[in-house]
Amino acid sequence: MLADLIFTTPPMETIFSDETELRLMLAFESALVTAQAAAGAIPAEAAATITDVCRQTNWDTESIRQQTLLAGNPAIPFVSMLKERVHQKDVEAVRYVHQGATSQDVIDTVLMMQLKQGLAQCQTDLNQLNTQLTQLAQTHRDTPMMGRTLLQQALPITFGDKVKGWLDGLLRAAERVDQVVEKDIVIQLGGPVGNSVSLGDHAEAIRARMAELLGLGNTPHAWHTQRDRLANIAATLGILNGSLGKLGNDIILLMQTEVGEVREGAADGKGGSSSMPHKRNPVSSTFMVAIAHHTPALVASMLAAMIQPHERAAGAWHSEWPVMRDLIRLTAANLYHANELIRTLEVDTERMKQNSNVPD
Amino acid sequence: MLADLIFTTPPMETIFSDETELRLMLAFESALVTAQAAAGAIPAEAAATITDVCRQTNWDTESIRQQTLLAGNPAIPFVSMLKERVHQKDVEAVRYVHQGATSQDVIDTVLMMQLKQGLAQCQTDLNQLNTQLTQLAQTHRDTPMMGRTLLQQALPITFGDKVKGWLDGLLRAAERVDQVVEKDIVIQLGGPVGNSVSLGDHAEAIRARMAELLGLGNTPHAWHTQRDRLANIAATLGILNGSLGKLGNDIILLMQTEVGEVREGAADGKGGSSSMPHKRNPVSSTFMVAIAHHTPALVASMLAAMIQPHERAAGAWHSEWPVMRDLIRLTAANLYHANELIRTLEVDTERMKQNSNVPD
Amino acid sequence: MLADLIFTTPPMETIFSDETELRLMLAFESALVTAQAAAGAIPAEAAATITDVCRQTNWDTESIRQQTLLAGNPAIPFVSMLKERVHQKDVEAVRYVHQGATSQDVIDTVLMMQLKQGLAQCQTDLNQLNTQLTQLAQTHRDTPMMGRTLLQQALPITFGDKVKGWLDGLLRAAERVDQVVEKDIVIQLGGPVGNSVSLGDHAEAIRARMAELLGLGNTPHAWHTQRDRLANIAATLGILNGSLGKLGNDIILLMQTEVGEVREGAADGKGGSSSMPHKRNPVSSTFMVAIAHHTPALVASMLAAMIQPHERAAGAWHSEWPVMRDLIRLTAANLYHANELIRTLEVDTERMKQNSNVPD
Amino acid sequence: MLADLIFTTPPMETIFSDETELRLMLAFESALVTAQAAAGAIPAEAAATITDVCRQTNWDTESIRQQTLLAGNPAIPFVSMLKERVHQKDVEAVRYVHQGATSQDVIDTVLMMQLKQGLAQCQTDLNQLNTQLTQLAQTHRDTPMMGRTLLQQALPITFGDKVKGWLDGLLRAAERVDQVVEKDIVIQLGGPVGNSVSLGDHAEAIRARMAELLGLGNTPHAWHTQRDRLANIAATLGILNGSLGKLGNDIILLMQTEVGEVREGAADGKGGSSSMPHKRNPVSSTFMVAIAHHTPALVASMLAAMIQPHERAAGAWHSEWPVMRDLIRLTAANLYHANELIRTLEVDTERMKQNSNVPD
């Protein structure tokens, strides 16, 4: 879609590329055998061989994509492919590939690694935005403008008050994002039915070591069908997008011809119209509202997908994949637009003053 | 609707009754003048008079309901009514009624008080449920059954493992509920445009004292159009309902005739069929799934309502009212059903053992 | 909730009262035996007795409400109660009560009767609204105003153009409502597993006659777990509310102090502010937007509830009940507000002209 | 994402590729000048020149993608690019490029052309599915199995009854899809503020001719901010996916180890497990449920986006783009999986018979 860049950013495209996904799957299998070898659960030589293979490049991702349609998920053809390559090096080592783990362990852990990277980008961008807003609020702490309730002029406020309102919600959003990064980004490792029996006596040590290697939080329980952490990440992003949507919408309202109190900065070609070249349209703020219109439904999708039967879901789990990807991409894009918006925002303090004198 | 009791509980009906709502509005106005008098912002005599009137009973709630259609919200006719009664006692005191506050201050604060009560009930019921589940997991820590992935028998687990899975999600849900109670249940007081100017020099002291009187958290900023706290409460409830829905759905699947590993307890008349009296149907678990099917959409409604323009929204704010009420009612009902379900659950360990022997 | 009347109307409250629901259940059972007797499937005397009992009043709806929590749905205690009363008159007739039918037959058919009544009210109100809008468009066909894109003044239109836009969507909405009334309001009668075997050889004749007696469309198949018709009704209402929300939102934007091109009519007390008595706020249009913010999520709930297992759902079916009720209530309320809005709308053609001259 | 093919199909990827989108934009501009020349509104030579340029290949889609971030939508850089190329051929003709049209005319019309193609594929696949189901119902019209209500065995039905249930909903879905194709797939042409004034006296003739050239329905009104048709298409797809989800979920339930009445056909590698090679997992049916879990939220997004201000929306319009694309892609994928599922379905009539004898 030619308009794709409204809804994503280059870093997110990298994080969710087939290449990254494959690389993270390899990192999972590599960490697994490393941790198992460290715990004495598998031979160190086998682990070394497998780790070596996991460093290889040029995997056939297209084949994995195609086989997913038969296998039900991409981990199955991926593991087969990995085993083949290990087999070429050391027949004995094959049995230790993916041993004790299950498809969902790989896929959930890879998603968590992607989310961690995506959230790190969001944290950076959100902090930058909040820094910008703090400065803007300071600059305009005494700039008078009309407060508006139910879109009627009410009583005077300052533009700084309005900015502090945006900041207030976004600072809480930043706290919530920090918290989910700390608490909800965890490894998945439980084996076929989640009870870790397949991982043997050293299951806890293996999981702890893997989590460390992969930079994820640890958890004593598999969460194959307990999806509250993902739902919480989704909701946290949903709330952040809501606060960004409020900001964007306020800008659009303030940019109205009849109000004219702010303008999006005039980068070359920004905000033009194909039919009316004299117009200056909201662009970044429009994108922010567009994204904030879509994210609530994605959160609902994640919440609805929490009803996952028994030890692994047939459908609800799979439904999460495009939704979580879209949510983090949309959030990153929203933050990008917000930073652009504030960075280039033009404030017409004169017009704010004039509008305050309109008899009410 | 004759089926209403599936979707609510008597305590929630009390909390969200017109009588409670009115009583809490009076508590707000009473706390406001008490705090203002304490701060020296209004005469103590006027505060005493107003507080006295706020203790009166027999208010005409039906009239408030009707006038809401003209006024746009119930606080406007309520304040008029209060002023009339104060006027009858002391003409001078009338000017101090609701002084410096705005409709949204009353309505948001009352909602927060209702949510606090509703959440307290949910905390109690969730803790009770988790206690029950802890006991159940302990009882069945060694009860073998089949683990099932994609609804296929996979490898053995214990029933204790399954219960610990439910408990795992619900313990995190309880933590999240505790956290929103602590952080997100706050007073709303900002005056017409949210900047507290209308409350005078003592605004901060007044807000702090009021929050204390009403048992709410304090916040330095009005949040008339920063709705992330409400959205976070909604999302927290949505996630809890998702975990309950997963539990209920597992029970329904285990109760299937062909599986038969658990049964809902046979209270008199429970689980019968109008056409097939021999059947034993899931009831509490059915209600749990029914509720968990509905709550994701309500969370989406709250997230979508976050785009609130300027200093007060025309529509998005109002849309929150039935949604938050329904969310807390549904959550309380879900917890009620869950406690009933676990309290009376019959576990057929023999059938679990038999099913484990089915050749796969 | 003191604000309830924003979200419903008196006719809807009547249609969805416990009394109406019970009366319609009795109508179902009465029509069933009448049709069965006409087909020779049961004795005419038994049918007459049962029909007589169905005309009795003073049923204990509170008891049905309470027993629903044990039985799983209100039809089970209702049928028991009906059988008891028939038993008092004629022991032999008892076996013919509800014979061949199942709980879901009663409950779905009653819902369809309620929806038919609710939709009839909506049709009336929507036609009235469209008549009003047709007149308004005619009146202002040549009233110049600025067209606005991305909330920027663009090029001139007439106010008639804008009204015709609203009308355009609402005329299609009216067509869609007419169509669902014609095609999707059907009887449910299939017996315990939906195959009509329990109704005997005359099942088709009985269903046809019952549909006629109850004023519903007929269908050869039971639709216990094929819920597309309900989903289609829900979606049709969702779309209508979207079009009403667009209208309401345009009014709010046109009422902005800085635009001031229309005003909601000043009924006594309408649109006042508790803290700023000089303001004129949008009221009806605010309610319209509030409702339109909530309905999309309710439609999503109905769509998500379509995954109903086998021959009757455990949960998804039950989740529909409050959602469909809320959807039709909200729609009726939205149409009420829309008619009020247009009926009393004040158009400031002078201001429209002035705003058109603002240099762009 | 390596699992992408679960959620889309090759034909949909073609329809929504940048190349197709660009080609359809060119088709729009070409049809516009052709129709304008035919109506005598612009010189035939200019039209011929522009049409020629529109046949050129090798457009720089990447540049359009990038410039969209500044321009707000892809039509603006596209039209600039087209004008440049026309300018190289005939300076005089440039003024006739896109004359009287607006960005939203191009973008909405292109979306409608994409939807038409996508829906045509869905119609073909849905008809094929219904043909398969008709045959399956016929084959198993007398195959006895247990009917199940609330997931409890209830009374016997035939497998043909169950298939006819699926078919019943899907035949209505097919009718609804046919109807939206006929009524809701229309051209967008209204000019900057939707009143067609920019198109001159021949606006109606131009629109009619263009609609004919592009294979779209005609409409007398622009629908820039009246989005009910798109919402109706979305809802129709949502309902279809719901019916498919019900079918998929029934298969998953029937495939349970303890039920075992059907199996997905064993294509090479289909339904395997990375950790448990002996298992046969549901695959196509799992994908169907996964998709049906996600689509309700997307429909809600489209309904929520109906509140579009004045003559063009700032945000709500843009939010539709990824949502409509995802909806049609998911629907096509769901139908693909459904056809695969039914084509290879194995029915274990013996097991159905055995299960019917289980004492209830």
Image (tube, coloured by chain):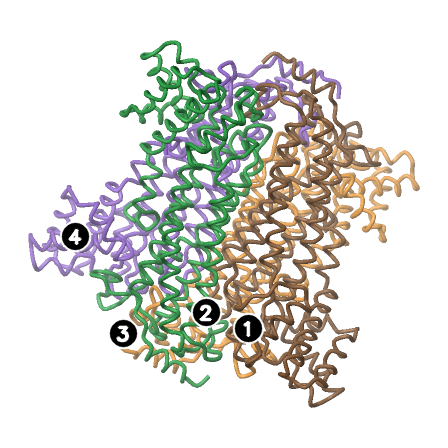
Chain colours: A orange, B purple, C green, D brown
Place of residue C174 in the rendered image (x, y in percent of width and height, measured from the top left): 45, 54
Q: Is residue D253 above or below residue D304?
A: above
Amino acid on which the number 3 mark rests in the picture = Asp
Q: Crowding at label 3, few (<14), some or many (≥20) Cα neighbours within 10 Å?
A: few
> Dividing the image into 4 quarters, which one contains the C terminus of chain A?
bottom left
Residues indicated by labels 2 and 4 sit on the same polypeptide chain: no
Circles 1 and 4: CB atoms closer than 8 Å: no
> Would residue C236 be found to the left or right of residue B318 on screen?
right
Disc nearest the viewer among 2 and 1:
1
Point out the residue furthest to the bottom here: D92
CA gap between label 2 and label 4 equals 39 Å
Within 10 Å of the Cα at label 2, are there few (<14), some (14-19), or many (20+) other Cα atoms? many
Q: Which residue is mark 4?
A: B81
Q: Give x and y (percent) for residue C106.
A: 44, 28
Residue bearing the label numbered 1: D190
Q: Amino acid at mark 1?
A: Gly
Instruction: Say which amino acid is labelled 2.
Output: His
Whether labels 1 and 4 belong to a single chain: the reply is: no
Dot 2 or dot 1: first in sequence order is 1
- Label 2's element? loop
Judge depth for marks 2 and 3 and give the one in front.
Answer: 2
- Dot 1 falls on a residue whose secondary structure is loop
Residue type of the residue flagged with mark 4: Met
The residue to which callout 2 is attached is D310
Chain label for disc 3: A
Q: Specify whether residue B340 is in view.
A: yes
Q: Relative to residue B31, is residue D152 drawn left or right?
A: right
The quarter of the picture where the N terminus of chain A appears is: bottom right
**Position in image of residue C205 (x %, y %):** 51, 27
